[in-house]
Amino acid sequence: MLSRFPELLPEIRRLHAKHYGVYGRRKMHALLKREGWKIGRDQTERLMRLAGVRGVRKSKRVFTTRPNKTAALPADLVNRRFAADGPRKLWVCDVTYVVTWSGFAYVAFVTDVYSRRIVGWNVAATLKSEVLPMQALDMAAWQSGGRLDGLIHHADHGSNYTAMVYTDRIAELGAVPSTGTVGDSFDNAMAEAVNNLYKTELIRQQGPWRTVEQVELATLEYVWWWNHERLHGELDMRTPAEVEQAYYAETETLLSPTG
């Protein structure tokens, strides 16, 4: 049976390497189907074994939250229900870190819940609110046209996100703050999942890391891949960019005179 696909072995190796060497059977099968191959999931698994490639295992969660015990905290408006009926309705935010030979690189992500698209990110050598998470938020706001009226901004109780300079910026943009519990991955599960996949798919695969700048460049490339090429199981094996394109295309159709 597998003799029908001899040309697939080098193609599987190429596609596996192109996608950070992280795809297992399920995503490789979906990718091959997108590439035009008519092949079953079990055949894909056997061919991957012959090609000497396999999926990467998720790493353990690492919490980087530093609680702010003095700040007045916003209510939890999400209550572990990470769902939205369209883009730019609910964003989740969190920070993680990368050990480099020159010190820690701290990484902040802003993720749109509807499409799983990383809409803002930043890498810095400091956790300061006005540097690390705020620049990620400003990037996300800029990509959304500058205003975030009515959008829910969800994070945990870390001091990075509850500092006055940061909460004031949320208010300036028109967003509504929401916070989960310190160190509780379930209360900010989607943001924790993004961090976990980033550490698993990029950081542990391509280390060791020498400098913060090296991490920043690699993160830039990874975010582009995440948004435009990575297949997400939660999105029916589509990319975040495809999900948003489909949403806006449908919205435009419904709003058109003939829709």
Image: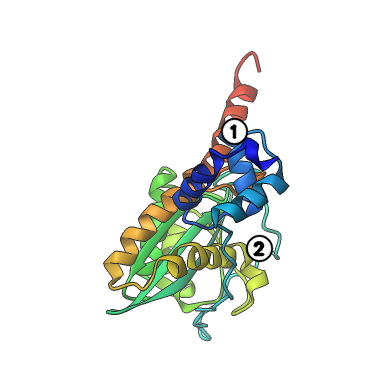
Q: Position of residue 96 (x, y in %)?
A: 46, 72
**Amino acid type for the residue under numbered disc 2:** Leu
Q: Is residue 114 visible?
A: no
Determine whether the residue tagged by mark 1 lies in a helix, strand or loop.
helix
User: Which residue is pictured at 71% across the width and 59% down the height?
Assistant: 81
Q: Position of residue 40 (x, y in %)?
A: 71, 41
Q: Is residue 222 visible?
A: yes
User: Which residue is pictured at 46% across the width and 52% down the height?
Assistant: 17
User: Which residue is pictured at 63% across the width and 73% down the height?
Assistant: 185
Q: Position of residue 57 (x, y in %)?
A: 59, 67
Identify residue for label 1: 246
The count of marks equals 2
Q: Position of residue 43 (x, y in %)?
A: 69, 45
Label 2 to label 1: alpha-carbon separation: 27 Å
Identify residue for label 2: 77
Residues tagged 2 and 1 counted as in contact (Cβ below 8 A): no
* Left or right: where 121 falls relative to 1: left
Determine whether the residue tagged by mark 2 lies in a helix, strand or loop.
loop
* Quadrant of the drawing holding the N terminus: top right
- Residue at the extreme top of the image, as rendered: 258
Crowding at mark 1 (Cα within 10 Å: few <14, some 14-19, many 20+): few
**Amino acid type for the residue under numbered disc 1:** Ala
Seen from the viewer's position, the closer of residues 82 and 243 is 243
The colour scheme used to paint the residues is rainbow
First along the sequence among labels 2 and 1: 2
Crowding at mark 2 (Cα within 10 Å: few <14, some 14-19, many 20+): some
